[in-house]
Amino acid sequence: MKKFQFIILVICAVIVHACVTTQAVRLGRGPIRPPVPWDQVIIYRTADQVPGKYEEIALLTASGDSMWTKEEEMYKEMRKKAGKLGANAIILDAMSEPSASTKVISYVLLGVGGERRGKALAIYVFPEKE
């Protein structure tokens, strides 16, 4: 019976750590904008790439187990969170990976691979005037 409970506990831990969680901290006192579909939220690598004036909406931080999540999933979840806040773009800040030794130790001791973390700035890019 104890072995069965342990297996269930490990499965639950894997399921929980397989998810990407994204937190947001709103910036400034700008207007609350309507949500934007996540697939319309554009990713920029630097602020210089943004094609015009923009307003900062929120700081985003995403995390997920490095054994079970991919960077692509992290970016998708940040786009979803940004879109819910009315942002139509994000500027990437940093993506950090646990070291190989951390992954091994975490996996052996806890059954997880260490935490992958990403940061971005959610922004609203104003439409270009014609």
Image (cartoon, helix red, strand yellow):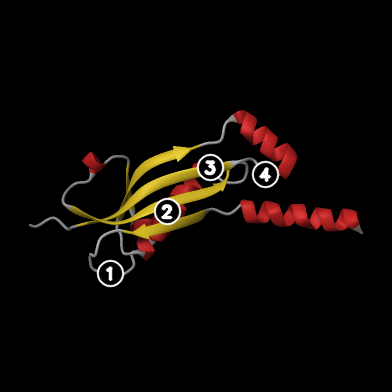
Secondary structure, mark 1, is loop
Indicate whether 8 appears above or below 91: below
Give how far apart the Cα atoms at labels 4 and 3 are: 11 Å
- Kind of residue at badge 1: Ile
Q: Mark 3 points at which residue?
A: 116
Label 4–label 2 contact, CB within 8 A: no
Going from N to C along the chain, the mark reached first, 3 or 1, is 1
Secondary structure, mark 3, is strand
Give the percent coordinates (x, y) of residue 112.
Answer: 67, 44
Give how far apart the Cα atoms at labels 3 and 1 are: 30 Å
Q: Mark 1 points at which residue?
A: 32
Secondary structure, mark 2, is helix
Label 4–label 3 contact, CB within 8 A: no
Which mark identifies residue 112? 4
Give how far apart the Cα atoms at labels 1 and 4 are: 38 Å
Which residue is most to the right? Answer: 1
Going from N to C along the chain, the mark reached first, 3 or 2, is 2
Give the percent coordinates (x, y) of residue 129.
Answer: 9, 57
Mark 4: few, some, or many residues within 10 Å (few <14, many ≥20)? many
Going from N to C along the chain, the mark reached first, 4 or 2, is 2
Classify the position of the C terminus by image quarter: bottom left
Residue 88 falls left or right of residue 118: left
Which mark identifies residue 78? 2
Give the percent coordinates (x, y) of residue 32.
Answer: 27, 69
Q: Which residue is drawn at 38% across and 65% down?
A: 84
Label 3–label 1 contact, CB within 8 A: no
- Kind of residue at badge 2: Met
Give the percent coordinates (x, y) of residue 64.
Answer: 55, 48
- Quarter where residue 6 is shown: bottom right
Q: Which residue is drawn at 35% across and 64% down?
A: 85
- Quarter where residue 48 is shown: top left
Label 1–label 4 contact, CB within 8 A: no
